Image: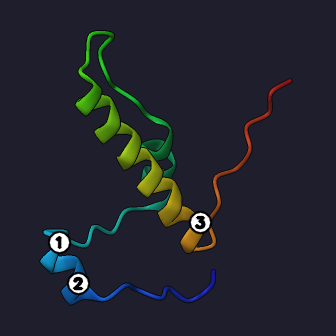
Amino acid sequence: MKPVAPTDPIAEQVQGRAALWLDRSDLEWLSQFCGCADDATEDVRERCARIRFRASAALHKAGMKRPIEDES
């Protein structure tokens, strides 16, 4: 695994963000899971997509890209 280069913690705090360390398997699940109901609002769907993207980006940044699922 390549070394983690964290972002500026003060800048993240100013944006109201908090650090969250998750296991690889949790990030993989989170990057793929969407629990939006069929009648979910666009805001809810955008939030879900943003969270899935950030989970995937965290895996990528840590050098733990999601395995490609076998489509056969």
Distance from label 1 to label 3 (Cα)? Answer: 22 Å
Whether residue 71 sits left or right of residue 26 in the image: it is: right
* Residue 18 drawn at (x, y percent): 19, 70
Task: Tell me whether circle 1 and circle 2 mark residues in contact (CB < 8 Å).
Answer: yes
Query: Nearer the observer, disc 1 or disc 3?
Result: 1
In this rendering, the answer to whether 51 lies above or below 42 is below
Label 1 close to label 3 by CB (< 8 Å): no
Q: Which residue is mark 1?
A: 15
For the point 40% across and 86% down, which residue is it?
Answer: 6
Q: Give the answer, above or below, for where 36 lies relative to 7.
A: above
Tell me which residue sits at (42%, 57%) in the image.
54
Q: Earlier in the sequence, mark 3 or mark 2?
A: 2
Residue receiving disc 3: 60
Classify 48 as above or below 22: above
Number of disc labels = 3
Nearest-to-viewer mark from 3 and 2? 2
The residue depicted at 43 percent of the width and 45 percent of the height is 52
Give the residue displayed 86% in from the left and 23% down from the top: 72
Crowding around mark 2 (Cα neighbors within 10 Å: few <14, some 14 to 19, many 20+) is few
Hey, which quadrant is residue 71 in on the image?
top right
What amino acid type is highlighted by mark number 1? Answer: Gln
- State the CA–CA distance, disc 1 to disc 2: 6 Å
Amino acid beneath label 2: Ala
Question: Residue 28 or 55: which is nearer the viewer?
Answer: 55
Question: Which of the numbered marks, if any, corresponds to residue 11?
Answer: 2
**Residue 15: x and y, percent?**
17, 71
Q: Secondary structure at mark 3?
A: helix
In three-dimensional space, the C-alpha distance between marks 3 and 2, rounded to whole angstroms, equals: 21 Å
Q: Quadrant of residue 70?
A: top right
Q: Give above or below for 12 relative to 47.
A: below
| Element class at badge 2 | helix
Is 11 on the left or on the right of 32, as rendered?
A: left
